[in-house]
């Protein structure tokens, strides 16, 4: 029953994680748009507005205003945006725990990468989450003051991301490495909200309520951290979604793919942020940023396609390739050697992950659709492709399924 309850926990936590992440990202993107789209208020300006924005949505008009330091008063309810961030991280960490930390030998460890024990893998994963946060904090505190050394801070943070990604791919399985890199960056994003953005805003509100001059420093720090969160967002989403694509996580060049895709995501996000200012005539069109991101994506597709051609050529003389070349229908008996090599470690007589057993022709036929989906379409199995299933072997299973009676 353990697997049954873990499946339910995985489903509900994943659902919660997606919901809260959507709410957090939506609010974050909206306020970035708002900040970037504010126009100078028309004179006179007795309330010392730094900008205002008119918008229309859902049949109504909205008038948003931003004050230079503090408004004359705060009327009505003051809305805060932080619960979404906290629950995104909490649900994500719980989801990571019930999947990866609960079964480290399955999800974290790839002996061909690093022959770790379960406890070593768990502590290494937790250590990377905490260690990256510490390194990030040191960079932000000592590499430059907010508003003055932002470029230098961004450069050091980018270097830290590269080094952390390299370390993760040297320790964990491909799937785990991608996910942990995303989790490290997401941990920083949520910590920025918890440790800096919200406390800074509370100080500003407290000063306002006490009738004191508002210190701009917390606002500057919060702004710097908010900008970092904005550019982390698309790379983090890429890392989280990568688990569905074994051709990325199982590649020998997975570190290259991970870093290049995250760079493309950051450039594309920067393009959209700059577009807000361009529409107001503040600077030129940011098309080079968008083009650079797209060029990286197209180049990655071409690079991986060339590698796929070379792989297929090297596998042309394998038994599976010979079986495919015969043109004859493929029977369940002919795919049993492939199943035995790549599936029975987890779905055989001794172990039945997800209560699935594939050590008989009848069992293979009963789970035909699931095998086809996981092995051929999703390429999610074998997990992390630890048994190095070839494309020819996947094609054999595909042909068996598609021609079976």
Image (cartoon, rainbow, N blue to C red):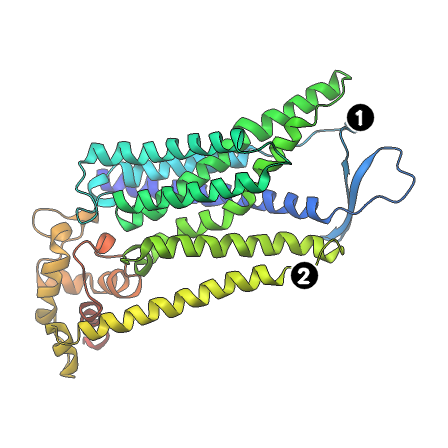
Which residue is under mark 2? 285
Which residue is under mark 1? 73
Tag nearer the camera, 2 or 1: 2
Residue at (74% x, 19% y) in the render: 209
- Left or right: 198 in relation to 124: right
* Residue 114 figure quarter: top left
The N terminus sits in image quarter: top left
Q: Where's residue 378, x and y in %?
A: 31, 61
Q: Where's residue 270, x and y in %?
A: 58, 52
**Residue pushed farthest right?**
44
Q: Is residue 116 above or below residue 322?
A: above
SS state under label 2: loop
Looking at the image, which is closer to me, 183 or 370?
183
Residue at (44% x, 36% y) in the render: 187
Residue 399 visible in this rendered orientation of the protein: no
- Left or right: 59 in relation to 301: right
In three-dimensional space, the C-alpha distance between marks 2 and 1, rounded to whole angstroms, equals: 38 Å
Q: Where's residue 95, x and y in %?
A: 36, 39
**Residue pushed farthest bottom?**
327
Q: Is residue 72 above or below residue 183?
A: above
């Amino acid at each position: 029953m353990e697997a049954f309850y873990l499946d339910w926990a995985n489903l509900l936590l994943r659902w919660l994680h997606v919901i809260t992440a959507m709410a957090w990202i939506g609010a974050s993107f909206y306020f970035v748009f708002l900040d970037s789209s504010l126009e100078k208020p028309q004179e006179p300006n007795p309330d010392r507005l730094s900008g205002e924005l008119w918008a229309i949505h859902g049949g109504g008009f909205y008038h948003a205003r931003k004050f230079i330091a503090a408004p004359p008063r705060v009327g009505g309810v003051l809305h805060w945006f932080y619960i979404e961030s906290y629950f995104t991280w909490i649900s994500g960490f719980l989801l990571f725990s019930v999947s990866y930390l609960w079964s480290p030998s399955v999800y974290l460890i790839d002996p061909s990468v690093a022959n770790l024990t379960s406890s070593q893998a768990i502590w290494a994963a937790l250590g990377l989450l905490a260690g990256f946060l510490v390194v990030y904090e040191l960079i932000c505190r000592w590499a430059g003051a907010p508003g003055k050394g932002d470029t230098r801070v961004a450069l050091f943070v980018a270097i830290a991301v590269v080094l952390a990604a390299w370390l993760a791919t040297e320790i964990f399985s491909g799937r785990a490495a991608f996910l942990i890199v995303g989790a490290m960056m997401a941990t920083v994003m949520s910590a920025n909200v918890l440790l800096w953005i919200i406390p800074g805003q509370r100080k500003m509100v407290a000063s306002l309520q006490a009738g004191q001059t508002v210190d701009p420093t917390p606002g500057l720090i919060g702004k710097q951290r908010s900008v970092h969160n904005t550019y982390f967002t698309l790379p983090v989403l890429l890392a989280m979604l990568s688990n569905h694509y074994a051709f990325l996580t199982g590649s020998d060049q997975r570190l290259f793919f991970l870093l290049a895709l995250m760079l493309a995501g950051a450039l594309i996000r920067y393009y959209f942020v700059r577009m807000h200012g361009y529409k107001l005539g503040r600077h030129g069109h940011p098309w080079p940023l968008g083009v650079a991101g797209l060029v990286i994506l197209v180049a990655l597709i071409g690079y991986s396609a060339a590698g796929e051609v070379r792989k297929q050529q090297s596998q042309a003389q394998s038994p599976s390739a010979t079986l495919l070349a015969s043109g004859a229908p493929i029977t369940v008996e002919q795919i049993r050697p492939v199943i035995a090599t790549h599936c029975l470690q987890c779905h055989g007589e001794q172990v039945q992950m997800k209560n699935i057993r594939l050590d008989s022709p009848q069992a293979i036929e009963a789970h035909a659709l699931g095998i086809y989906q996981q092995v051929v379409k999703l390429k999610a199995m074998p997990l992390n492709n630890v048994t190095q299933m070839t494309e020819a072997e996947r094609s054999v299973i595909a042909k068996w399924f598609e021609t079976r009676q």
